[in-house]
Image (cartoon, grey):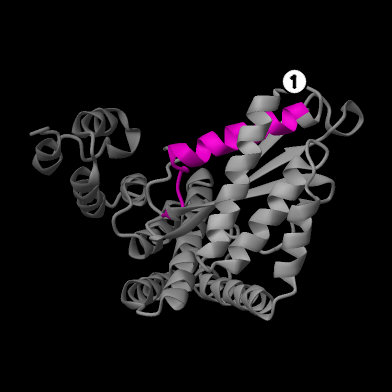
Amino acid sequence: MDLLDADGLSSKDLAEIDLLVAETDAATAGDHDGFVVEGIVDVRQPGVGTRGRLVDLRRFEGPHQWAPAEAMELALAWFRVQAMKAKRQPKDAAFLTAQFSQAVAHANSTEIAGDLLGAWREYLQIAATFDGLTDVTALRAKADSLGKQKSVREAVKQERKDFEEQTRLENDVLTNLPATSERTDFQPDTLRTAEDKARDLRVLAEQGKRTDRARVYKRALAGAFVGAMETGIGYLDNRDYSQAVRAFSCATEAVPDSEWAWRNLALANGLNGNRKDSLAALKRVRELATDKVAFVEWTKTERAFERIRSTPEFQTLLKTN
């Protein structure tokens, strides 16, 4: 199973990456010293600094997935700036000037475009990133001025409300999926309710006409999808295959075009002895697979399909044309 697959989160929304640089020492972190990268779905704090660490947020259009090349290039450049700031690399004046100018220009364009909340955050981030490397007094003043504007304060409040609503919608689905298979105080129909709620949330995300509401629905759907996948994987690890089937079914309802979800559903059904359902899921995986040869190799070696490998239906799936 590929636990790092990022194919399934189909929310056509702003995705975000959060880049953290942590200064650690041997006394508290052992041999783990240096830069830490984290991916996040949302941002719940408007500040830039947190517990002595710098946070640099980059937004890009698209689903929550691996960031595009340009965002990764900015991330790597940011790491290099921090290395110079920490005196781990020699300072490159030309590089620092170019990065600073590029960041300020982008923040200015964000402000001119009318995204004052985004501009406010960018100015704060630039000031925190380049503090000690160049004069950031003017940037701090600009950020302070924007932060006092009513529209920015209201945007922060609205964003907080949106995240609260997102959490509520996610939980409405995921509370019907027990976190572990050790629980015995639930009925199978509870998990089927999770499938129904995931389907309902997907419909809301697809039909949402208001951009702001659609964003909340899509992010909630992505969170519900990830939660269902994590729950299903937990069931697989505990060899509770029947409950894994229900969890992965919920994930496929949330994101029907996720090859990752359908692969795991096929595995869970196969391991649970559900031959017909496993074949149906495999058929869907084959439809979604971009690399048919890799799909065939996977099905030939995966032990979950041993009971169905000799069936005519399975052999049909092995055709690559």
In this orientation, which residue lies closer to the viewer: 320 or 24? 24
**Which residue is tagged 1?**
89
- Does residue 23 sit above or below 55 in this rendering? above
Residue furthest to the top in view is 90
In this orientation, which residue lies closer to the viewer: 253 or 291? 291
Q: For the residue carrying disc 1, how many other residues have a C-alpha within 10 Å: few (<14), some (14-19), or many (20+)?
A: few
| Image location (x, y in percent) of residue 208 | 36, 77
Residue depicted at 31% across the width and 45% down the height: 270
| Image location (x, y in percent) of residue 279 | 21, 48
**Which residues are the magenta region?**
62-84
Is residue 21 something that shows in the picture? yes
Residue depicted at 30% across the width and 28% down the height: 301
Relative to residue 199, is residue 33 drawn left or right? right
Q: In which quarter of the view is residue 319 placed?
A: top left
Residue depicted at 39% across the width and 71% down the height: 192
- Does residue 144 sit above or below 201 in this rendering? above
In this orientation, which residue lies closer to the viewer: 262 or 169? 169
| Image location (x, y in percent) of residue 305 | 28, 38
- Look at the image and tell me in which quarter the C terminus lies: top left
Is residue 286 magenta-colored? no
- Look at the image and tell me in which quarter the N terminus lies: top left
In this orientation, which residue lies closer to the viewer: 135 or 64? 135
Q: Amino acid at mark 1?
A: Gln
Is residue 66 magenta-colored? yes
Residue furthest to the right in view is 27
